[in-house]
Image (cartoon, rainbow, N blue to C red):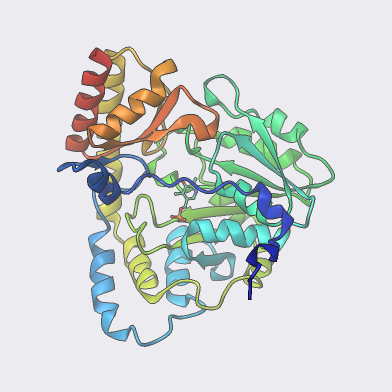
Amino acid sequence: MVYLSNQIKPRTVLKNIEPYTPGKPIWELQQELNLDKVVKLASNENPFGPSPKGVEAISSQLAELNRYPDADTVEIKQAIATSLDVKQEQVIVTNGADELITLISEAFLEKDDEIIVPSPSFSEYDFGAHIMGATVVPVPFEEGFQFNVQKLVDAITERTKLLYLCSPNNPTGTYLSKADLDQLLQAVPKDVLVVLDGAYSHYATADDYTDGIEYVRENQPILVLQTFSKIYGLAGVRVGFGIAPKSIIQSILKVKEPFNVNSLAQAAAKAAIADEEHVQKSRKGNLAGCEQLYQAFQELNLDFTKTQSNFILVKLGPDAESTYNKLLEKGVIVRYGKGWGLPEYVRVSVGTKEENLFFIESLTSILDN
Ligand SMILES: *Cc1c(COP(=O)(O)O)cnc(C)c1O
């Protein structure tokens, strides 16, 4: 008997899906090149570690692992609602913000609908559109990777369903000002949902930055997405959340799996959101790291974009790919920009002072040769 498994046809829309390229894990590079020391500055993780309160909460939860987690994530919703001054019914908690992007896509996108994405940005928005057979309309950034509200508005058609705004934007570190968001929300038709991805909002320091939550409080058609993976340092347990007017949350709840957020993640997130000390320490360490890297880039005569986040986009020029590979050989993992259409750039996550120094020394020795 010959089995012809290649006659099992996947949905045709899967052809549009590009595999996600994660930052190379530390163990993989260590094994490949037999390196003692590897510094990973590729996934915008918190280099100062997880919230200690979050870790403690996980330990105290371990004996309960025989139980299913709370399907309604009540305690963590309460904690989020209190901390951000919104109503519990305006919150949805998910298995990382990545899951939320998929759920938003499943809840709102019909085949051939359009999503608008300032480009380049986070690739999960495209992924969510593609699995639903929807179309991605990229709107390139202006000079210096600045947002252009008018161009985003001009890109809206009858088919537009979602408009994504990542602010601060991954991978550029640039942000949308409050005045621009005001203008955009005025101009967007009422049947278009604006998704403001604030994965890095805790890092932003600009006076005219907004995390968008005030608009949810006013019941505007906006969904603010946040995560525990970045400043809270909990990327490994996977927990993120969305805040939006109740009717939007209710639609998304319809496509959610009941036990999407595991009990360790729920416990850790609840503790971490109250861990102000860890947030402050992370923010401060990040600002110092940004200054350290800016100064090094200036000394190396490299162009970079000032960031409102915990990563910096730096232009290495035509040799960027080989420099990226040489950094790997020295045990430094950064993210190469080609996938974003930026073949002359790399994105480096801000590490600890020592990690940044290792990166700077490695880069300097590569560029000197
Ligand atoms: C890291 C990141 C997320 C969310 O990550 P999760 O780990 O899935 O919560 C969302 N948006 C952007 C832009 C990110 O960089």
x, y percent for residue 153: 74, 35
Along the line of sight, the residue nearer the viewer: 7 or 123: 7
Classify residue 136 by image quadrant: top right
Against 221, is 21 above or below? above
Q: Residue furthest left?
A: 36
x, y percent for residue 359: 24, 30
Judge left or right: residue 110 versus residue 10: right
x, y percent for residue 308: 42, 34
Q: Is residue 201 visible?
A: yes
Q: Residue furthest right?
A: 158
- Residue at 68 percent across and 61 percent down: it is 10
Judge left or right: residue 4 versus residue 173: right
- Residue at 36 percent across and 64 percent down: it is 237
Against 106, is 295 above or below? above
Which quarter of the rendered picture does the N terminus lie within?
A: bottom right
Which quarter of the rendered picture does the C terminus lie within?
A: top left
- Residue at 23 percent across and 61 percent down: it is 52
